[in-house]
Amino acid sequence: MEAEAFVSRRTAMETPGVDSRVSSAAAGAEFRWMGNRLLDATGGFVGSLSPRMPGEPDFTPVVHRVETSVEPEIDYEGLPQGSATSTHMLAGSVAGIMEHCLMYPIDCVKTRMQSLHPEPGARYRNVMDGLRQIVRTEGVWRPIRGVNVLAVGAGPAHALYFACYEKIKLSLSDAIHPGANSHFANGAAGCMATVLHDAIMNPAEVVKQRMQMFNSPYRGVLHCMGSLWRHDGPAAFYRSYTTQLTMNVPFQALHFMTYEYLQELLNPHRQYNPSSHVVSGALAGAIAAAVTTPLDVCKTLLNTQEAQAIHVIQAEAATAAVGAAAGSRHISGLTEACRTVYRMGGVPAFFKGVQARIIYQMPSTAISWSVYEFFKYIITKRQHERRLRGDGDK
């Protein structure tokens, strides 16, 4: 009798119905045979077996849990190598706005220190002295006057700037040195990206620097724009564009080449590494800023059209009896700007404000690169995770 019961019980366990229930559920759960009931780990009923006979031992077979695969941690190297253009544009826009807004007070001091003939109340020993004097004599909000126009221009300008840089850098690198970094490609991409960036930023730079000058006559951004349009026409907003490009093309070429080179040294695996982005960005900005300071002085003169500088060239033209030049009301072009700077201060005048420019550019480029890399990493990671979840649902 006991032998028949044991055989019938084994037969019941080996029947297709019970076996299918066990095998189908055993993929991720633990089962126990309690008496004549087969239960899962939560106590749910799976199947029944023939009754246990008196004196027969209670077998408790266990189907061990089979661990399901866990999605691995996504790291920077595991992300797709070619981020979407929209990702570069969004990350670049945020980086540009933060960079210019956070460093705007230093930029205000730099603009004033580059003045060829500063007013007595706008002569500063250094950047901190300039900030203290501006706040004490003109109010706490004066160092950020005009920041709104720069924020409006920096968003789209940096969106195109970084998107163009990433796209051209990738294309040129693949053509020149497939699968590896090319310094020539980095520099060339930076130059081409600068053309788009400056086309948007130049009008904002003109208005910004006009409002930053000591005793600026403008009540606000709109008043400044309207006054420039009425008195000088639309050409006033792009008078320094060629000079801006002449300065920014070598600046950005040197900037990007230095940054990418330092990344190879400090972050060879190109992981998301905030400290390497900050250090590389700061050093790249400082080197590029120091080298291109003379061109920046000329650009500031073209944007601000200092009255004292115009009086000097008019007086010299009148003395030389050059009638056409004697009536000149504007300094136009890089050549004339260079001559004017040299006449008013010699060679040292080309390096006016170099300390302020370096102090401005170091944290500025560090903020720009660290914010850009952070948002590119976050956005790309989330897009990658969504794609993985979408593939897993199919």
Image (cartoon, helix red, strand yellow):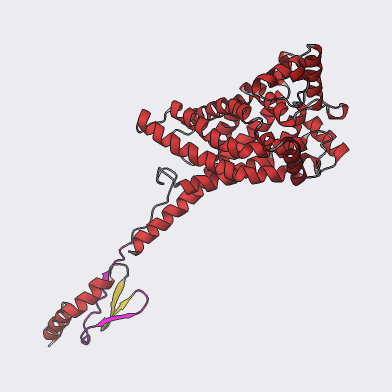
- Vertical position of residue 1 compared to residue 72: above or below: below
Total numbered labels: 0
In screen coordinates, is 251 left or right of 393? right
Percent coordinates x, y for residue 42 in the rendering: 37, 76
| The quarter of the displayed image where residue 282 is located | top right
- Residue located farthest toward the top when viewing the structure as drawn: 320
Most distant residue in the front direction? 323
Q: Nearer the viewer, residue 303 or 371?
A: 303
Seen from the viewer's position, the closer of residues 326 and 111 is 326
Residue drawn at point x = 66 percent, y = 40 percent: 100
Residue at 62% across / 42% down in the picture? 154
Query: Which quadrant of the view contains residue 326?
Result: top right
Q: Quadrant of the N terminus?
A: bottom left
Does 74 lie within the magenta span?
A: no
Q: Is residue 49 magenta?
A: yes
Magenta segment, prevailing SS (helix, strand or loop): loop
Above or below, 142 against 130 in this view is below
> Depth check: 151 or 87 in front?
151
The foreground one among 343 and 259 is 343
Based on the displayed image, in which of its 4 quarters is residue 252 positioned? top right
In percent of width and height, residue 243 lies at 63, 26
Quadrant, the C terminus: bottom left
Asked if one can make out residue 82 in the rendered structure from this viewpoint, the answer is yes
Which residue occupies 33% across, 62% down?
67
- The location of residue 390, given as percent across then percent down, is 38, 61
The magenta span reads: 41-66
Answer left or right for 385 relative to 318: left
